[in-house]
Image (cartoon, rainbow, N blue to C red):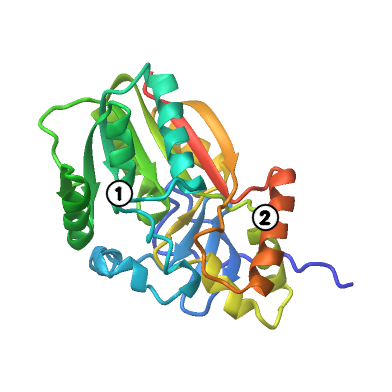
Amino acid sequence: MAAMPATTATDAPLVPCALCGSSSYRRVVDLGWRRILKCAQCGLVRADPLPSPEEKLRAETYDYEQDVACPEVQDLFANYHRDFVEDPIIRRMRQHLADLENVTGGPGTLLDVGAATGIFMHLARERGWRPIGVELCETRAQEAMKEFDLDIRVGTFEQQSFDGVHFDGMSMLDVVEHVPDPLAMLRRAHALLRPGGAVFIAVPNQQCLLTVLVNTYARLGGPNAQKLLPRLYVPLHLHYFTPATLTRLVTTAGFQRRLLRHAPVYLGRYTMPLWMKVPLKSILTVGGALGMNGRVEIVAVKA
Ligand SMILES: [Zn+2]
């Protein structure tokens, strides 16, 4: 078997690494219309080119369920309404809130960045939190407010002023990987929390066994690589975190890390045939046993 080709250095991209400022990158994979690069200094993985703010807004306000880049996820949000079913994703969200409460000392004011369907804010309120949400997509925010009777501000996180409120808790579920400048986002989060307040972050894990296998397959020139890669590197994701780079993100922003957990991906809401689901589940299960799970979660506290 031929040795795996070494990754090759690429031309310096226009935008330096959001985490360490380096302009030295190595190519992870190439999707044709975008490259996935890894910072040679800190290891943060990112898409190149990054979209302009206008392109980003257009992409994020496009109906998520209709995102045809990945048909398997079309039903992912079907269970986020008032009559939701207690599936593993809902139980996981309750665990996120318990993790946050363990650090903050209990429920209080909560800012949910990327409120989406509002389900997380609803679950938080059930436990005694007083949640405010921020959501980029106006249609989605309106639906969430109507469904769960919530206070959600429309726009980017950076655009919002909260009248000097210092929050007890903050949540960013599948959000940090969507933004062009995650460090600026976490620095602002730090400024908006009270001392002793904490942020809960959950992101896909770039060190997931499935991702590692697909990357290797693509680098070896696998014939189906261009079908697989867009499912891993969806257009809305701009950065790809590992436990190490996520930890570096929060500590660089001034936080102390209190909890780091690997979590499995729940496939129950994905629409895919058995021939796809069974091997995928096997890889994810083996990955979990090897400490290469599909998701990373972190709780970081403002000291
Ligand atoms: Zn870097």
How far is the residue under mark 2 from the one under mark 1?
26 Å
Q: Residue furthest left?
A: 163
Instruction: Please tell me how crowded label 1 is: few (under 14), some (14-19), or many (20+) other residues with Cα within 10 Å.
Output: many
Which quadrant holds the C terminus? top left
Q: Residue at x 56, y 58 (%)?
A: 267
Give the image location of residue 257, x and y in percent. 49, 27
Describe residue 188's horizontal placement relative to residue 229 as left or right: left
Describe residue 19's horizontal placement relative to residue 172 as left or right: right
Q: Residue at x 26, y 36 (%)?
A: 111
Give the image location of residue 275, x and y in percent. 68, 74
Give the image location of residue 88, x and y in percent. 51, 46
Q: Residue at x 46, y 55 (%)?
A: 239
Q: Amino acid at mark 2?
A: Leu
Instruction: Please tell me how crowded label 2 is: few (under 14), some (14-19), or many (20+) other residues with Cα within 10 Å.
Output: many
Residue placed most toward the observer, 187 or 267: 267
Q: Amino acid at mark 1?
A: Gly
Q: Which residue is mark 1?
A: 114
Q: Which residue is mark 2?
A: 284
Tell me which label, 2 or 1, sits earlier in the chain. Answer: 1
User: Is 225 above or below relative to 46?
Assistant: below
Secondary element at tag 1: loop
Describe residue 140's horizontal placement relative to residue 238 as left or right: left
Q: Quadrant of residue 296?
A: top right
The answer as to whether callout 1 falls within 8 Å of ligand 1 is no
User: Is 120 above or below relative to 109?
Assistant: below
Query: Which label lies toward us, 2 or 1?
Result: 2
Q: Quadrant of residue 228?
A: bottom right
* Badge 2 vs badge 1, beta-carbon distance below 8 Å: no
Residue placed most toward the observer, 159 or 168: 168
